[in-house]
Image: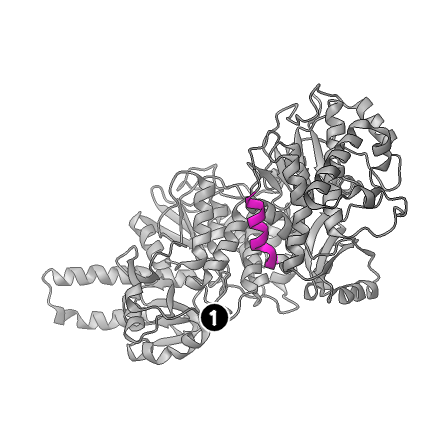
Amino acid sequence: MAEPIVFMYSGLGSQYHRMGWTLYQQRPVFRAAMDRMDALLTRETGRGVLAEVFGAHHGVSEPFSDPALTHPAIFMTEYALTQELAEAGLVPDLVLGASAGMLAAAVAAGALPWEEALLSSAAQPELMRRSCGPGAMVAILDEPALFHSADLDRYGEIAAYNFDTHFVLSTTAELLPEVERVLTERQVVHQKLAVGLPYHSRWIEPARDAMLGHLRALPWAPPTVPVVCCAAARQLDRPTAEQLWTVAREPIRFQQTIRALEAAGAYRYLDVGPSGTLATSVKYLLDDTASTVTTVLSPFGGELARLEQLLADAPRVPRAPRDVAPATPVAPVALAAPAARVAPVAAPAPGSAAGAGGAAGAKTAFVFPGQGSQRRGMGAGLFDEIPEYRRVEREVDEIVGYSMRTLCLEDPDKLLSDTRYTQPSLYVVNALHYYRALQEGPVPDYVAGHSLGEYNALHAAGVFGLLDGLRLVKRRAELMAEVRGGGMAAVVGLGPDAVAEVIDRHGLWDLDIANLNAPTQVVVSGPREVVEGAGPAFEAAGARVYQPLRVSAAFHSRYMREVADEFAAFLAPMNFASPAVPVVANVTAGPIPPGDPTATVASLLTRQIAQPVRWSQSVDFLLDQGVTDIRECGPGKVLARLVQQIRQAREDQQQDQRDQQGQQGQQHEPHRRDRQERLAPPAAAHTAPGHTAPGHTAPGHRPHPAAVRLAPVGGGSSVREPVGHHG
C-alpha cells in the first residue's frame, strides 16, 4: 500500500507577489477557484486581492506584508491548489496546518466551509490590528538555544521551531532593532519576515476576546480527514475556536509535529503553500525514512512542470473537486513521537517487586515535590544514568530552548529561582528520580504530587508522556512569570480551622487558604499588602511562625480564576490517557475518577490553579488505603518531612481517642506536650513547597462575611472558599 499523503498548509511569511500566477494562467480549475473567491471578497468586504497579488507593477521580490491582503491571499492560493489537485483525483489522507494555514487545512478536511474561512482570513488581521501594536517576526538560522544564550528572551519570544537550526522569533516594532543588533553582532544569519504583527507571542493577548468571539461564530463541523495542528503537535478530534486561537497565540511546533508523524510510519508530504517553506523544513527532519516530500509552488518558478509531474506520478482517487475526504484511513497522530515518550507505569503489577524491596502485600506511593525543592546540582549523576532520559535529552532542550543539564547541575546564570526555569527543571529532575525509583523498588500502587509535582504524578501514571508534560509545565511557568501583585505566607502552628477563624475574626476577607501542607502548616494567599500586614493577627492567635514567601502572586486562590481560564484554553486541544495507576489529585484529595480522562484531567489541572492544594488530606487518603511506603521522587526531602508530620498527627489523634475512652488525661499530659513539640517544624522547614500556579492578582472588593463559606475538606478540616467558585 502506498504511503498516506499529507497536505501541508503554511501561514504568514510564505506569501509573495504573483504567487500561483502560472497556474492561474494555465490551469482552469485553479483560476476559477481564485476568481470565485476574489469575487466573494469584493462583494462582502469591498476589496479583492487578485489585483494586488497579480499586478504587473509588482515583482516577486517586492515586500508583500499588509496582513489584510496577505492573509486571504495565502488562503486563496492554498485552497485553489487543493481544488486543482482534487479535480485530478489527488486528495489527502491527512492535513497539517501551520499557523494561519490551519484555516485552509480545516476547509480541506471538511471542518469549515470555504466561504466562511475566506471571510475569516480577511477579518482576523483587522481584529488583531485593533487590539495589538505593530510587531515583527524574524527567521533565524541557528539552534533555538541561542534564544537564551544571546539574551534574545529579553526582546522577544520563540514563535516557531522549524528544525534543529531554524527557529522564528516574534517581537514588537520597538524591540525589533535590538533583536537585529544582537543577531548582527553575533553574525547569525537571519531574515525579517513580511509579517506586520507579533503572532505567536504574548503581544497578541489583547486580541484574545475579540478573536475568540469571531472564531466561535464560525460553523465548525467534525472533519472528514484527520487534522494535525502544529501548535499542539497532534491530531485534533474537531477544530474549535479555542484551538484556532491557540494556533495564533502559541509557538509553531513543526519539528515536533513531523517527528510524531514519522514515528507512526512513512508519509508522502505535499506542501500546498505558496513558497515550499514547509517542504524545506521537512527535508531537514527526514532521516533514514521512506517518506518523501514534494512542493508545487515556488517564488523561483517551475510550478506548472512540478504540478504535472506530481499528477503523473501520484496515485489518484476519482473524486469531485469539493469532496476532500481521505482516500485511506490513517491512525490518529500522537502528541509526541512514541520513541520520544517515556513508558508509563505498566508492566509489573502495582505493588510487585521490580527490583530491590517491595514486600508482598505492602502498598507503595510515589510522591513528587513542587517549587521550593529546587537547588543547584539537582539531578547529579542521573542525567547520564537514566536511559529513558538520554533518549529524549535533545528534544527536552529543544522544547525549553536551553540545556536542561547545564541549568540543573551548574545554574551558571542563577536562573533556578526564576519560575520560568524552576518549573521545567524541577519537572525533569523529578522524572529522573522517578525512573531511578522504578529501577530500585516496586512499581507504585498510588502516585501524587504537590502542585507542580502533580504533573509528574500524571506522567508516572501514563496520562501523558515526559515531553508532553514538559510542554504543559513550560506554558504553566510562562503564565506564572507574567503575574505580579499578590503574595503568600506560611502559617505554622495553626490548623486550617483556626486560620479560617482568624480570617473571619479580623476581617481579612481578601485572604484565601492556598495550601494545606500538614495539620499545623497552612499557606494563605491574597493581595500582597494584606498578606504582609496579617502577621500580628495570626501570631496573636498562637501561630509559631508567620512567614511571607518569596512569590510573585496569590497562587491557588480566587485571584487566579482569569489565568485558570487561559490555561484551560491552552489545555483544550490536548488529549490525555486514563491513568494506569491511581493519581491522588490536589483539588479533591482523592483519586482521579473514571470516565473521560481528557475532560477530567484538564478540569483538575485548571481548577488546581485557583483552588487549594489539599496535601495533608491527600496523604491521609493514601494512609487510609493502607499505603505504608511513601517515597519522595525529587530533590530534597520537603514532602518526606510533611508526611512525617501528618503521620505523627494521626498517631496523636488515635492516642487522644484512646485517652477519651477511659484513660486519665492527667497521666498523659507529658505526652501531649511532646506531641506539640514534635508538630512544630524546625525553622529550616518553614518554606512551603509547590507555590506554582499562574494568574493575575489584582485584589477585588472585600466580600461581606456572609459571602464566604467554610467548605469541608477531606479529613474533617475546613477551607475558606468563595461561594460558587468551581475553579
The percent position of residue 622, horizontal first and vertical second, equals: 34, 51
Task: Using a 10 Å C-alpha cutoff, classify the residue at mark 1 as few (fewer than 14 neighbours), some (14 to 19) or many (20 or more).
Answer: many
The answer to whether residue 97 shows anywhere in this view is no
| Residue 578 covered by magenta stretch | no
Question: What is the quadrant of the C terminus in the image?
Answer: bottom left
> How was this image coloured?
one colour
| On screen, residue 356 above or below 290 | below
- Horizontal arrangement in the rendering, residue 167 relative to residue 376 (left or right): right
> Which residues lie in the magenta part?
205-217
| On screen, residue 548 above or below 251 | below
Question: What is the quadrant of the N terminus in the image?
Answer: top right
The answer to whether residue 659 shows anywhere in this view is yes
Q: Amino acid at mark 1?
A: Gly
Q: Secondary structure at mark 1?
A: strand
The percent position of residue 161, horizontal first and vertical second, equals: 70, 50
> At 86% from the left edge and 44% from the top edge, which residue is drawn?
55
Circle 1 is placed at which residue position? Answer: 486
The percent position of residue 508, horizontal first and vertical second, equals: 34, 73
> At 77% from the left edge and 42% from the top edge, which residue is drawn?
284
Q: Principal SS element in the magenta part?
A: helix
- Horizontal arrangement in the rendering, residue 484 relative to residue 725 (left or right): right
